[in-house]
Amino acid sequence: MSKIAFIGLGHMGLPMARNLLKAGHELKVYDLVQEAIDELAAEGAKAARDARDAVAGMQVVITMLPASKHVEGLLLGEGGLLESITTGSLVLECSTIAPDSARKVHAAAKARGIEMLDAPVSGGTAGAAAGTLTFMVGGDAAALEKARPLFAAMGKNIFHAGPDGAGQVAKVCNNQLLAVQMIGTAESMALGVANGLDPTTLAEIMRQSSGGNWVLERYNPWPGVMLNAPASKDYDGGFMAELMAKDLGLAQETAQHSLSSTPMGALALQLYRLLLKQGKGKKDFSVVQKLFTE
Ligand code: NAD
């Protein structure tokens, strides 16, 4: 069993940390939000006073933070957390951040004799709770083998995407595709309903036809079609639209590096920015449905 520091106990981090606890690992947890620490402490984790306290004496450090600036701000630079992490430890950076940002953290960790993997996830809050996340891992294959039992306690599919930063590249490709599927599904749902179709009937027809996709299977954006989907809970919970906008921005940055043409991703980013301007950034990303109905 490993001694793990877990930092970032939000929508994703908290259930991921809980699954590690359930698997019998020793956890010391930290977040800027005290209630999240208290919740896990009540279930057997040790509560850390700050991030430095969390990593002291631990063999593994897992971070699940919002974006590049949080990860770099916490780990890098003078007084950054990497300075407090024991040499020979393993850092699993699971946030979705820029591939370049991940590579910076890899280089800084290596310079201190710390192994690191970029390991963003897919599967949403439901996957985090159920322990069925997909991990897309960038970095050294031998480090991945060390981390595999920990990933397996939190997820189902574990992919080695390639060298440092490759996990993040895979993640931005996936999320760009997810956003495009979500927007396309929302647009078609609105079109059908505006022309007299029952939303549940339309959703089922498309799900079982050639338009079928992950959104229609698990995450329909029309309220009432799937009772467990965020759309049926006033778009609360799930994956915030502002995080999707962030990921689409990362996809555009990544495309700029390779001079790739990504017109669908560019349009998706503009539509999500519009949602943010409308004050819907904290809602689940399926709230894009409202662009076509309000
Ligand atoms: P979140 O905003 O709910 O959680 C982030 C947590 O990090 C918050 O609790 C915040 O207080 C904490 N935090 C920020 N800075 C900190 C610091 N310096 N020290 C300690 N704690 C700090 O976000 P989330 O939905 O859990 O997403 C986390 C990451 O996972 C993001 O990069 C996101 O893009 C990615 N992701 C999210 C989902 C999803 O469905 N929510 C799915 C896949 C990937």
Image (tube, helix red, strand yellow):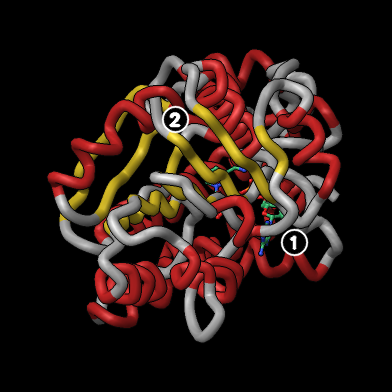
Q: Find residue 147 and report its horizontal and vertical position in percent.
A: 29, 37
Horizontal placement of 143 versus 72: left or right? Answer: left
Q: Is residue 45 above or below residue 242?
A: above
Mark 2 Cβ inside 8 Å of ligand 1: yes
Q: Quadrant of the N terminus?
A: top left
User: Which quadrant would residue 44 be assigned to in this image?
Assistant: top right
Three-letter amino acid code at the position of disc 1: Leu
State the mark number for residue 285: none
At a point 41% along the width and 20% down the height, the residue shown is 209
Q: Which residue is mark 2?
A: 133
Q: Residue furthest bottom?
A: 78
At a point 44% along the width and 30% down the height, the residue shown is 133
Secondary structure type for disc 1: helix
**How far, Cα to Cα, is label 1 from label 2?**
27 Å
State the mark number for residue 275: 1
Q: Find residue 33 and report its horizontal and vertical position in percent.
A: 81, 51
